[in-house]
Image (cartoon, rainbow, N blue to C red):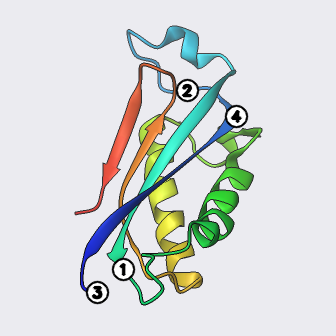
Amino acid sequence: MNQELTLAVSSSFEAAHHLVNPTAFNEKCLKLHGHSYKYTIFLKGKIQDGGMVEDFGAIKRYIINEITKLYDHSDLNRFFYNPTAEMLVLDMAWRVEALIEDNSLKVKLTKIELAETDNNRVIWESQ
């Protein structure tokens, strides 16, 4: 079957950080604090012979579990000098693309939505 579909898989992690570049609006973010991050990755691919684009179990095992394990209960300042949601989603996209390739998954990353709070999110989309 030549039909392409997009799969969306969501998860979450808890992490701490503090911003280091002050602005007029982020004074409280300069102090160490935490967030309950929620994210959804969007993967596009063709339906394979077994009727699936990719097994959700494989996506969870090879991508979701690895991303969550990396960031969960961590201090994001150890990954980034100034760990904004924008920097985090860029890093996540790079890591997800590498995990797709390393595990020979038959999908392409098209989008990641990362919510730092219920009201604030950043969206990465492939070009």
Q: Is residue 37 left or right of residue 91?
A: right
Q: Position of residue 14 (x, y in %)?
A: 70, 34
Which circle marks residue 19 in the picture? 2
Q: Earlier in the sequence, mark 4 or mark 1?
A: 4
- Tell us which disc is closer to us: 4 or 1: 1
Q: Please rate how many residues cluster around mark 1, counting C-alpha atoms within 10 Å: few if below 14, some from 14 to 19, many from 20.
A: some
Which circle marks residue 14 in the picture? 4
Residue tagged by mark 1? 47
- Tell us which disc is closer to us: 4 or 2: 4
Task: Give residue 20's quadrant in the image.
Answer: top right
Q: Are marks 1 and 3 in contact (CB under 8 Å)?
A: yes
Q: Please rate how many residues cluster around mark 2, counting C-alpha atoms within 10 Å: few if below 14, some from 14 to 19, many from 20.
A: many
- Quadrant of the image for the N terminus? bottom left
CA gap between label 4 and label 1 equals 34 Å
> Which residue appears farthest toward the right when viewing the image?
73
Determine whether the residue tagged by mark 2 lies in a helix, strand or loop: loop
CA gap between label 4 and label 3 equals 40 Å
Q: Which residue shows up at 43% across the image and 52% down it?
A: 90
Residue tagged by mark 3? 1
